[in-house]
Amino acid sequence: MDAGLSIGQVAERTGLSVHALRFYEREGLLADAVRRESNGRRVYTEDDVEWLDMCIKFRSSGMPLETIRKYTGLVRQGSGNEQERLALLRSHQDSITTQIEDLTECLRVISHKVSIYESHLADGTADCLWVPPAPAESSEAS
């Protein structure tokens, strides 16, 4: 039988801390229960590492823990709920697509501003880029 991977090895391979790995397990985010040795130490499989890598991508893309937990639960149930899994993934895909579109617009504006600053700096006219308005004079009678 394969000796498996220690929690430290999995932490190193996934970039997650040991604390985060325990959290993922406690929150029910692993597709399979982590096997334990007779001394209580966790033993992970390559499948666990692949699953964790996917969960990391889900989290990095903003998928809520509750959605990951729901997806994991559906996977654990086995076949027959593929449409529901697909719906969760499509919903998140749509969310990411919207985020990318929003960020692309932000990048367009920032790139435009960068080009303006580069042009003005090259021309020596950067001092006119932003001049704060003069303070309003007090209308109080002295």
Image: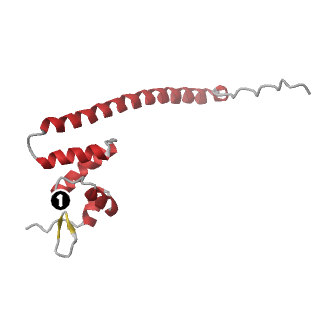
Q: For mark 1, does the 10 Å Cα neighbourhood hold few (<14), some (14 to 19), or many (20 or more) residues?
A: few
Answer with the quarter of the image where residue 13 lies. bottom left
Answer with the quarter of the image where residue 91 lies. top left
Residue 32 vs 57, above or below: the answer is below
User: Could you tell me the amino acid type at mark 1?
Assistant: Ala
Q: Whole-percent x and y of residue 138?
A: 82, 26
Q: Residue at point 60% right, 27% down? A: 120
Q: Nearer the viewer, residue 9 or 126?
A: 9
Q: Whole-percent x and y of residue 31?
A: 18, 52
Q: Is residue 2 left or right of residue 73?
A: left
Most distant residue in the bottom direction: 39
Most distant residue in the right direction: 142
Q: Quadrant of the C terminus?
A: top right
Q: Whole-percent x and y of residue 34?
A: 19, 62
Element at badge 1? Answer: loop
User: Which residue is identified by label 1?
Assistant: 33
Residue 128 vs 54, above or below: the answer is above
Q: Nearer the viewer, residue 46 or 120?
A: 46
Q: Is residue 108 left or right of residue 90?
A: right
Q: Residue at point 21% right, 72% down? A: 40
Residue 4 vs 118, above or below: the answer is below
Colour mode of the rendering = secondary structure
Q: Residue at point 28% right, 55% down? A: 27
